[in-house]
Image: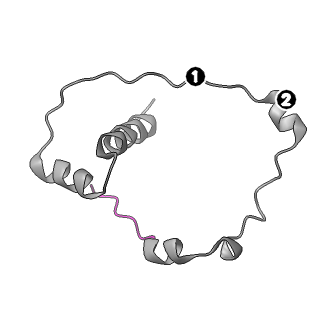
């Protein structure tokens, strides 16, 4: 991947709840919930995809749920390349 994150994740992970600035997030009002909709998750499909060993090892090294993380990465890629 050519897009390497420059985020200092150790610093982000070390933040306490009090240190996280949420002032730019509007409060969830009754109107928000009135206008919201419940979305049933789309069920996943089981497919076979060939992945090079290095990529698979990287995802597996990220911890549990590596398959879900691979799926999320594919979804983000697809959304970024939609016409």
Residue located 71% across and 75% down the image? 18
Q: Mark 2 points at which residue?
A: 34
How far separated are the C-alphas under marks 2 and 1?
18 Å
The reply to whether the magenta stretch includes residue 3 is yes
The reply to whether the magenta stretch includes residue 49 is no
Give left or right: position of 5 versus 37: left
Q: In this view, does 40 lie above or below 30?
A: above
Q: Residues within 10 Å of mark 1 (few under 14, many from 20)?
A: few
Q: Mark 1 points at which residue?
A: 40
Q: Which of 18 and 5 is in front in this view?
A: 18
Q: In this view, does 29 lie above or below 34?
A: below
The stretch of residues the image draws in magenta is 1-8
Quadrant of the frame with the C terminus: top left
Residue located 48% across and 22% down the image? 42
Q: Residues within 10 Å of mark 2 (few under 14, many from 20)?
A: few
Q: Nearer the viewer, residue 64 or 77?
A: 64
Q: Which of 75 and 61 is in front in this view?
A: 61
Q: Is mark 2 on a helix, strand or loop?
A: helix
Q: Position of residue 67 (x, y in %)?
A: 30, 40
């Amino acid at each position: 991947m050519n897009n390497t994150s420059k985020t200092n994740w150790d610093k982000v992970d070390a933040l306490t709840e009090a240190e996280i600035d949420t002032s730019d997030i509007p409060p969830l009002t009754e109107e928000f919930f009135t206008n919201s909709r419940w979305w049933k998750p789309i069920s996943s499909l089981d497919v076979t995809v060939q992945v090079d060993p290095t990529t698979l090892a990287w995802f597996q090294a990220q911890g549990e749920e590596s398959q879900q993380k691979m799926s999320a990465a594919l979804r983000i890629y697809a959304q970024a390349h939609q016409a």
